[in-house]
Amino acid sequence: MSALPVAKLAALVVKQLAKPLANLAKEKAKQSYFFRTYICMPPAQFYHRCEMKIKMWAMNLGKAVEIPKLNEAMAIELGGTLLGEGIIFITGAVLVTAEVVRRNKKDTAIEQARRDELESILDRLRDMEIEASRQDAQLREINRLCLALQDKFVSPPPSQESTVNVTKTQHVEQLEKRSPDTAGGSCTKP
């Protein structure tokens, strides 16, 4: 179940509970001197004064000099209504704040999971780069060894070729010393 219907359901429950709570506040105000004098009546009188000043200003009747106070019964009724509405508003604000905090935590957790996954992918990529460079070095070493083996088995080593060439050159020189008149090209047996 998603959070939005739960929040709406909770708001509906709070609204339904606020009405009996407002009625209870009115009854308490009628019965308790402290509740009536210090909790219900001062906000009701303040609200009445503000409402009258705004009405006078809106109707352009001038500045109100003296605004009569509400009688006790009307002040208790208005104070109880204000208290009930205040309870509804505060509860709704708490519910909305809780939903925003929950959503932020969820979004933060999703973002952190995404960051962790990205970091994991980057770590694996770094490991693969290291492994690839290691394998590249191994391949270069294998290629070097293959070329060395190929040179060894396919053709004589460079030191043997130079020895063979030196031996052939020495042999030709010896032949030329023995028969100076055959240096032109025909070879005779000694």
Image (cartoon, rainbow, N blue to C red):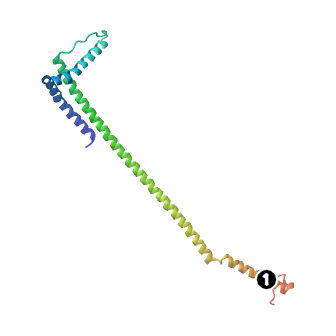
As rendered, which of 170 and 99 lies closer to the eye?
Answer: 99
As rendered, which of 139 and 106 lies closer to the eye?
Answer: 106
**From the image, which quarter does the N terminus lie in?**
top left
Q: Is residue 186 visible?
A: no
Q: Tell me if 155 is positioned left or right of 91 in this view.
A: right
Residue sticking out furthest to the front: 34
Q: Tell me if 140 is positioned left or right of 117 in this view.
A: right
Identify residue for label 1.
172
Q: Is residue 6 above or below residue 161?
A: above
Query: Where in the figure is residue 109, as x and y percent of width and height?
Result: 35, 46
Q: Is residue 108 visible?
A: yes
Mark 1, Cα crowd under 10 Å, few <14 / some 14-19 / many 20+, is few
Query: Where in the figure is residue 21, as x and y percent of width and height?
Result: 17, 29
Q: Is residue 79 above or below residue 13?
A: above
Name which residue lies at 17% across and 15% down: 71
**From the image, which quarter does the C terminus lie in?**
bottom right
